[in-house]
């Protein structure tokens, strides 16, 4: 990627999390990987110069599927017909767990920021202005996005920054993960107006 | 929808345009409707209190398909199992052309703003700060999003405001329409930090 090293996106990892997430009833489950989410999130991360997109799933069959998709577009026939997709998917990795993602990306250093997103507000949520300040100082950073009905409690426990929900016009808060992630990444890394 | 009438979203229509759009080679074509785009754009518009989402396609078979999807989720079985989806799809209409959309939404009044988006910059593009000022004053407004490789020239001719492209970290500019639209709607209608 051709971003300057000082860009905060270069030090950042994004997690597309399929476990642990909540279902509609509030139970902790593992959601299915959606190939479209992988493509959309990869293009989004490439747009903002994010160092790596981690697809988090403990299901080995689904992990192999994502790896086949990545190989098709980065080395196989897809890489010849769609170079933009190749460029986006080059920076995607598949991992078993959030812990493995944090370990792989060196998130155990002092001052690292692990951010979680939520459709619900609550104690200790930070504004995007505050989050940008944190990112500017953090040596490494991660942002976790939950599929299905959002990240389960254990994912929140692994984080030290909780981002405010995206405020719409009222209390309707049902954006797809690819749309919420687009808005949040633009607020964190987009160049202003 | 429960937005206050003074919210600029309430006076706004969003167009998900399948004709006229460009293909990879730069020819003007009609793209296929993608059911996922309709769902994502409907949820996005509902989040920001947009008055109406228009799905623009001249293909009658595809128009009927979208109408069936809307009916399933607003009146059929889907409306019982997923009320959030019902709420989002209640404000979706299908039209043959951009002209029909503008006519249907009363965009012929003085001072109405018809905004187009583009992945390319150029003469006369306005910043999002300027666009928010325009929206605050406009009695009616529309924002057109092109599928495939973006809006073709004729769509630009129907507009009077051209929004700046979303600036990423460099010249990579290949966001899916649902991601670009999410970012742009948040910049136009989102409540700040």
Image (spheres, coloured by chain):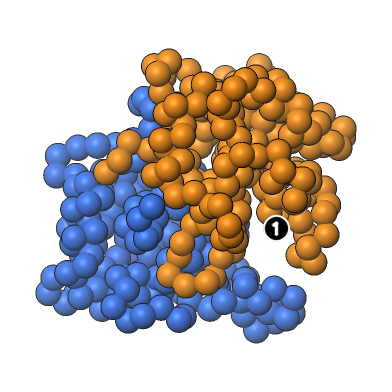
Chain colours: A blue, B orange
Q: Is residue A2 above or below residue A25?
A: below
Residue shown at the point (78%, 63%) measured from the top left: B26
Task: State the image coordinates of residue B34 (x, y, percent, origin top left).
Answer: 71, 45
Side of B89 relative to A15 (left or right): right
Q: Nearer the viewer, residue A25 or A166?
A: A166
**Depth order, front residue of B148/B117:** B117
Residue B45 placement (x, y as % from top left): 52, 32
Q: In which quarter of the view is residue A191 placed?
A: bottom left
How many neighbours does mark 1 have within 10 angstroms: few (below 14), some (14-19), or many (20 or more)? Answer: many
Above or below, A187 against B109 in this view is below
Asked whether residue B118 appears in the rendered view, the answer is yes
Q: Residue A145 location in percent, x, y?
A: 38, 54
Q: Is residue B152 above or below residue A80?
A: above
Between B50 and B104, the residue placed more toward the observer is B104
Secondary structure of residue under mark 1 = loop
Q: Is residue A68 visible?
A: no
Residue B61 sits in quarter: top right
Q: Which residue is mark 1?
A: B149
Which of the chains bears the disc numbered 1?
A: B
Foreground pick, B136 / A49: B136
x%, y% of residue B28? 82, 54
């Amino acid at each position: 990627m051709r971003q300057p090293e000082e860009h905060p996106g270069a030090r950042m990892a994004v997690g597309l999390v399929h476990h642990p997430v909540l279902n509609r009833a509030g139970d902790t489950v593992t959601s299915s990987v959606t190939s479209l989410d992988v493509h959309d999130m990869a293009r989004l991360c490439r747009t903002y110069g994010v160092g790596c997109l981690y697809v988090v799933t403990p299901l080995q069959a689904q992990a192999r599927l994502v790896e086949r998709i990545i190989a098709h577009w980065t080395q196989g026939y897809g890489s010849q017909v769609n170079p933009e997709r190749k460029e986006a998917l080059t920076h995607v990795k598949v991992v078993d767990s959030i812990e493995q993602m944090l370990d792989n990306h060196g998130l155990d250093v002092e001052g690292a920021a692990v951010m979680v997103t939520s459709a619900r507000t609550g104690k200790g949520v930070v504004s995007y202005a505050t989050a940008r300040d944190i990112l500017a100082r953090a040596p490494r950073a991660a942002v976790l996005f939950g599929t299905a009905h959002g990240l389960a409690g254990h994912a929140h426990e692994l984080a030290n920054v909780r981002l405010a929900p995206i405020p719409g016009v009222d209390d309707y808060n049902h954006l797809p993960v690819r749309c919420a992630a687009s808005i949040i990444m633009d607020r964190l890394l987009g160049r202003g107006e």
